[in-house]
Amino acid sequence: MAGFLRPSDLERVDLDATMVSSDKVLFLNIIDPKEKRHGQRVTKVITIHPHTDPFLYPVAVFE
């Protein structure tokens, strides 16, 4: 399955909370500033698994 991030999602990525696991899985935290649940801002976690072609998976930017 493949998905795309909207430009509005890309500008809301919390770079401080972005992490790469030991098996090269990238976790992006997207914070929605307007939407709240129980008084807390809503955070979506996007998981990106590695691709065999390094040009299609630029994880080195976050390492």
Image (cartoon, rainbow, N blue to C red):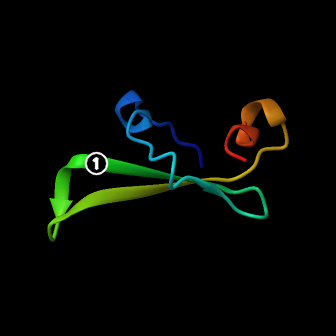
Name the side, left or right, on which 10 lies relative to 31: right
Q: Which of 44 and 62 is in front in this view?
A: 62
Q: Residue reaching furthest bottom?
A: 38
The quarter holding residue 37 reads: bottom left
Across and down, in percent, residue 48 comes to: 62, 51
The residue type indicated by label 1 comes to Asp
Q: Tell me if mark 1 has few (under 14), some (14-19) or many (20+) residues whose alpha carbon lies within 10 angstroms of its own.
A: some
- The residue under label 1 is 32
Residue 54 vertical placement versus 33 (above, below): above
Across and down, in percent, residue 1 comes to: 60, 49
Across and down, in percent, residue 13 comes to: 44, 43
Determine the residue positioned at 39% across, 56% down.
44
Element carrying mark 1: strand
Q: Residue reaching furthest left?
A: 39
Determine the residue positioned at 52% across, 42% down.
3
Determine the residue positioned at 50% across, 36% down.
4
Name the side, left or right, on which 10 lies relative to 21: left
Q: Which of 2 and 63 is in front in this view?
A: 63
Name the side, left or right, on which 30 lies relative to 19: left
